[in-house]
Amino acid sequence: MNKVLFVACVISIMMATATSPAHATSDMDDAVQLTSTLKVNEGSIDVTHSWRQLAQDTCTNAPTGFLGTTGNYSVAQYGNNYISIAWSPASDTSAKLAFVDRTESYPEHYVILKDSPSAYYTDILYDSNNNSFVCTDFQSGPYTSNDPSGPGGSKPYKAFFTTYPVVYPDGYEGLRIPTSQPNAKYVAMGDSFSSGEGNPAYEYGTANDGLNECHRSPVAYPRLLQSSVGGGLSSTTFVACSGATTDNVLHGGSAAGSWGEGPQVDALSEDTEVVTITVGGNDVGFKDYAVACTIYTCSFGSVAHTNIMSEITGPLSGKLESVYNKILEESGDAKVYVLGYPYLVGDLADGDCMSLGSNDGDIVEVTDALNAEISASVAFVRYNPAHPEYEDRIEFVPANSDNNSSPFDGKILCNVPSYFNGVDLIEPENSFHPNTLGHAAYKTIMEEYLN
């Protein structure tokens, strides 16, 4: 049997000894390797909550039923570049996962899918050179033999979940393969300031023109946090989407800001422990305001300034409060961090350099007003007498400071180094978003709160 088929069939490499009575129970206790999140390309892309969509996008030759919700599945991670899926229809009642006993020829224990007359196996391979996935080697039929050239070594197989019955060896006291998909501990929500707009190449499936332009970047601060905070945020769902409004967070949508991905709040669960979010800028039309500042005028008294201030002081607070309350309701006991927006420019009156001309001071005023409304909305929800527990669960995280304590301070557009992208005439959506230094700054701010 070829290695690819073996990889696609094996659900977990076993690091134990035989089930023979001659071996102590402790020899098998840590046999199963598990993963609570599916990552490929050395962790830069997390497909924990989108493996089925990934299979739908890549496995176009899949048999009928393979991508449905009926039947049994086993999903696992192989090294850094493979996700393997086994499936059999609901009518196949004999299929099960079972341990393969250790012998001298096969010194490892494996869990394999066996006794199935109609199972299918496939690998989804990530090609880092092309930032794309390939569905490889659809195979069918039962798998009942072992292969000494199987996984192991530098590419261990880790079980993600299985709906098949699992037959564990007598005396086994180790980890159990989850019977349902694990929920993420960290949910990263919000708009382009969280998705990483302006920092390509974007994660698979989020940069398809006209189909999905959420533009989630592997260098966005949620990804940086995921790999930095002591492993505590390793199980992550990254649903932030460029252009997202409060309505997209709550209800999804088929066009810009959601692209049919569904409500961002659907990623929350009782298992969620940490939530981060930036939202509100698109609700008040900050993008249109920034364009006016660049091409026309956005100073006090201008149409652009009047429009955005009326949005900030008008319906925004109610929209934000609805989002924060829904997140708190749907996320168990999670801690929710609402991040503010950093200053894009400075104020000439304070001696700062000039980024967008005489408009700079007015842009600072608008940024302050937006952050003040976000902070006030957080406080209103936090100190709700009907939910005293919210006081310890939601917090506003400012991006700016009055005492030069924020890593964003002074890193405005006209300074070197700047933490923002300047005007990009070729890819205008990149303009005025935090660059890699900006997202590293967001990460630094959040680490102080998380640690």
Image (cartoon, grey):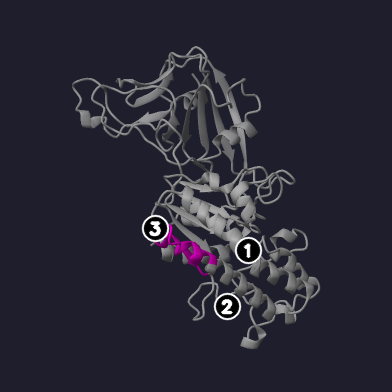
List the residue tagged with mark 3: 389
Pick whichever of labels 2 and 1 is earlier in the sequence: 1
Mark yes or no: residue 62 visible.
yes
Residue 15: image x %, image y %?
32, 32
Label 1, secondary structure: give it.
helix
Identify whether 353 is placed above or below 104.
below
- How packed mark 1 is, by other alpha carbons closer than 10 Å (few <14, some 14-19, many 20 or more), is many
Q: Nearer the viewer, mark 2 or mark 3?
A: 3
Q: Residue at x 61, y 33 (%)?
A: 134
List the residue tagged with mark 2: 410
> Which residue is more in the foreground, 218 or 271?
271
| In magenta segment, residue 220 | no
Please identify the quarter of the rendering in which residue 174 is found.
top left
Residue 381: image x %, image y %?
49, 61
Image: magenta residue range: 377-398
State if disc 1 and disc 2 touch (CB < 8 Å): no
Residue 283: image x %, image y %?
67, 60
Q: Residue at x 51, y 34 (%)?
A: 83
Numbered tag placed on residue 316 in the rendering: 1
Q: Determine the residue located farthest toward the front in the rendered image.
A: 386
- Amino acid type of the residue that numbered disc 2 sits on in the rendered structure: Gly
